[in-house]
Image (cartoon, rainbow, N blue to C red):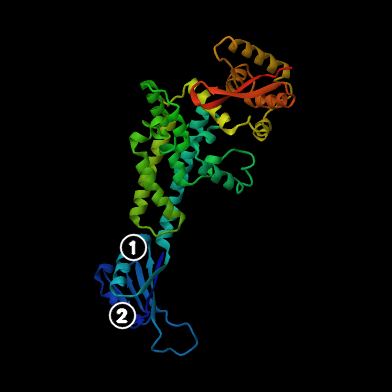
Amino acid sequence: MNFEMLVLDPGKKTRCDNALSLLFALRSFSRLWQKPQLTEADLTIRDQSYSLRVSDQGSQSSEPATKSQSRAFAIVLAGGYEHIEPLRLPIVEFIEEQKFEHRYITKDEVSGYIACELYPYLYRVENSLRGYLTRFMTTRFGGTWWKLTASKEMDEKAKMRKKNELVFGKRIDNSSFLIDFDELGELIFEQTSGFLTREDIENRVMQLAEDVDALKALKSDLQSNYHKFFKKAFADRDFKQKWKAWESLRNKVAHTNLFTNDDLVEGKKIAAELMNIISDADESPEQPTVTQVEREAVQEQIIARTGSEPSVAAVALDNSLLDLNDALTEEIFLEELHEQETFYSGLTNGFVGLVRFLRFHLTELGYTEAEARSMLNKLQRANKVEVYYVENPYDNTTKTAAIRCATP
C-alpha cells in the first residue's frame, strides 16, 4: 500500500531546501523508525517491511530553474497495512511542524482499504432496516403505509430517484429504498404515523375535546414511531445513538474521506450492534400490534388526504400479477355492498367505510384487494357505486372515505 503527500513551501519558511534535506529531517523523527537504512542515491529510507521516499516536485517547465520557484516535494510511504496505517498521522503532524505552507494527501490506499472493508457492513445494515420497516409497516397498515409515514420531502425524493431504477423501479414499490441514510433512521426515531405537519397537529389541537381522555389520545397519536412502535426493540437499546454514529462513518465512505484503523474497528462494532437490534426486532415473539380500529382509521385517513379513490395505475400494477378472469363479479360486489349498507343504516350515523369494505369485508370472502379495487373502478365509471366522504369516527379533524350504491 502507498500513502503519498505533496508539500509546498512557496515562502521558503522551512529549512528543507531540497529533497535530501527533507529526507534527513524525516529520518531524524525517531517515532517513525526501528532499524532505518537511508540511501541518498534514491532518496529512500527503508525499515524492515516499509519504506519512505522523497522526491523533488519543483517546476515541470522546460525553462531553467530560478531562485523564485517554490519548493515542492512528494513523500511516498509504502508497505503493508499494519505498518503504514499508524505512521500516516505522525508524518502529517511532523510535516506541519516543519512549516510547509501547503500540505496535501494525494493518495491514501489505507483509507481506500478501510472504506472497502466497511462498505459491505454499510450495505447490510442499511438494507436490513429498509426491509424490516417495509415488512413491519406493510403488515400493520397495508401497502399505503409510505404515504402516511414518510414526510413530503422523503416522498418527493423517492419519486425523483425512482426514475433511475430503470429495471425494477417500474414493477415494484421501492420508495423506502430510495431515501437517504439519515431519513431512513428518522422513520424509526423521528417520524410519527398520522400527524406529520404542524398544520395537522394544530387542526387536531383546535378540535380537541376538553377532557383528560382526549388529551391522552392526542399524546399517544403524537408519539414518534420510536416510542409508539419501536420503544422496546429499538429505543431501549440506544438505536438512535448507534445509528447516528454509523451515519457519520457512512458519510465518510460515501465521500471518500480519510480513515484510521479506529474507524474500522468502531465501524464493525457498531454495525454488528445495529444488525443485532434489527434482527432481534424482526424475530421477536413480542411484536408491536395495531388494533383493527387504528388500522382502519389510518387507512381511511390516507384516502381522505389524497382526495380520490385508489389510482388506476396502482390497481393495474396489482392486477398484472393476478388472474382476474371470473373471480369477483359486478353482481357479487353490488350484492355485498347492499347488504353492508342495510346493516350500517341501522346504526347512528352508520356508513360503509371504503377501506373496510374493500380490504377487509371482500377479502374475508376470499377475494383479493386488487380484484375489489379493479371492480370498484369499473362500477364507478358505470355510475353504479359512489365514493363519498364523511367525518372520521376516530378523528373528527379528518374525513373518511365511504362507499354506497349509486341512486338510480
Q: Nearer the viewer, mark 2 or mark 1?
A: 2
Residue 222 seen in the current view = yes
Q: Is residue 170 left or right of residue 128?
A: right
Residue 132 seen in the current view = no
Q: Quadrant of the C terminus?
A: top right
Q: Quadrant of residue 114?
A: bottom left
Give the camera-side residue of 51 and 152: 152
Circle 2 SS class: loop
User: Horizontal and vertical percent for residue 117?
Assistant: 43, 52
User: Horizontal and vertical percent for residue 74?
Assistant: 40, 75
Q: Is residue 360 left or right of residue 338?
A: left
User: Horizontal and vertical percent for residue 128?
Assistant: 47, 39
Q: Is residue 251 above or below residue 49?
A: above
- All told, the count of numbered labels is 2
Q: Residues within 10 Å of mark 1 (few under 14, many from 20)?
A: some
Q: Kindly identify the amino acid type of the residue bearing the numbered disc 1.
A: His
The residue beneath circle 1 is: 83
Please tell me which residue is depicted at 72% across the width and 23% down the height of the picture: 379
User: Horizontal and vertical percent for residue 237?
Assistant: 34, 36
Which numbered circle lies on residue 13?
2
Please tell me which residue is depicted at 33% across the width and 72% down the height of the picture: 46
Q: Residues within 10 Å of mark 2 (few under 14, many from 20)?
A: few
Q: Quadrant of residue 30?
A: bottom left
Which numbered circle lies on residue 65?
none
